[in-house]
Image (cartoon, helix red, strand yellow):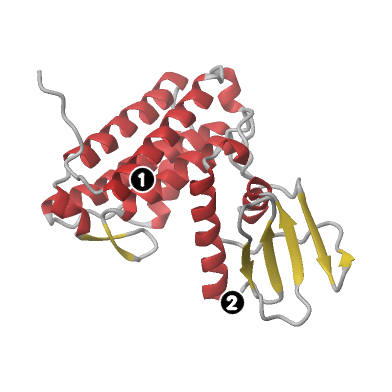
Amino acid sequence: MVARHDQTTDPVLLDGLLQARRGTAFFARKLNELTDAELDGDSLLPGWTRRHVVAHVGYNARAVARLVEWAATGVETPMYPSVEIRHHEIDFGATLSPIALRNLFDHSAVHLNVEWRDLPADNWHHKVKTVQGRVVPAEETVWMRTREVWVHAVDLANGATFKDIPAPVVERLLMDITGAWHARGTDKDLVVKVTGQPSALVFGDTAADSPTVVSGSLAAIAQWATGRGTDGTTAERDGGPVTPAPPAPAWI
């Protein structure tokens, strides 16, 4: 039997697919380390158990697959009928039996991977619409999924940290977050500095006269910027410390 491979030959896209698949494998590993009883425990997301996180990641794969199908067929297939239905779907998924919840993750991940693999090279440029209403090329679905699996693996509160996420993924994540802040104007008087890098990474309101400057390693800043804790970060304003560090603006 002849092995089937991705139809795209774009090296950038193939690298993105590799990061998404590695993230999926990492999430699967952290999920499989949990006992069925531990699925009932709290996640890092307020109001969500680990069950909610797994259900969300599973249904997200199905939703992203619908966008890839849209790019393949030209038939509009939205991610979700509505935001309300999306929320209801996650709440329902959290009530599934442990084996059904695990199967949801496994099967939806395989389905999405097959849709990506079989998408003709030219169709990756076809436009689709995200749940937020953004019109993007189908290749954007790879980053959408990459972000979900890596970050939510941390949210399982099972030992994973932002240090486990590949640096290129974290850097792009920070660009997304700080870009969203800038677009909304919520980064006023806020500067973010990533330390310990070969070249400086600075985001935010760099023209401010007296900004609050939040500094930390790439992993620490990503954790802070996503609203998942301030460990490893410091903050100062006008040369003096700010304690505790201010919460990051909302990014979603």
Residue nearest the viewer, comparing 84 with 45: 45
- Give the number of callouts: 2
> Can you tell which mark lies on residue 16?
1
Residue nearest the viewer, comparing 108 with 136: 136
Label 2 sits on residue: 185
Task: Say whether residue 204 is left or right of residue 168.
Answer: right
**Residue type (three-letter) at the residue carrying disc 1:** Gly
User: Closer to the N terminus: mark 2 or mark 1?
Assistant: 1
Q: Measuring 32% from the left and 50% from the top, which residue is drawn there? A: 12
At which x and y percent is residue 44?
64, 40
Query: Residue 206 sits in which quadrant?
Result: bottom right
Q: Is residue 71 above or below residue 60?
A: below
Q: Is residue 142 above or below residue 21?
A: below
User: Of the residues tagged 2 and 1, which is closer to the observer?
Assistant: 1
At which x and y percent is residue 78?
27, 55
Q: Is residue 85 above or below residue 48?
A: below
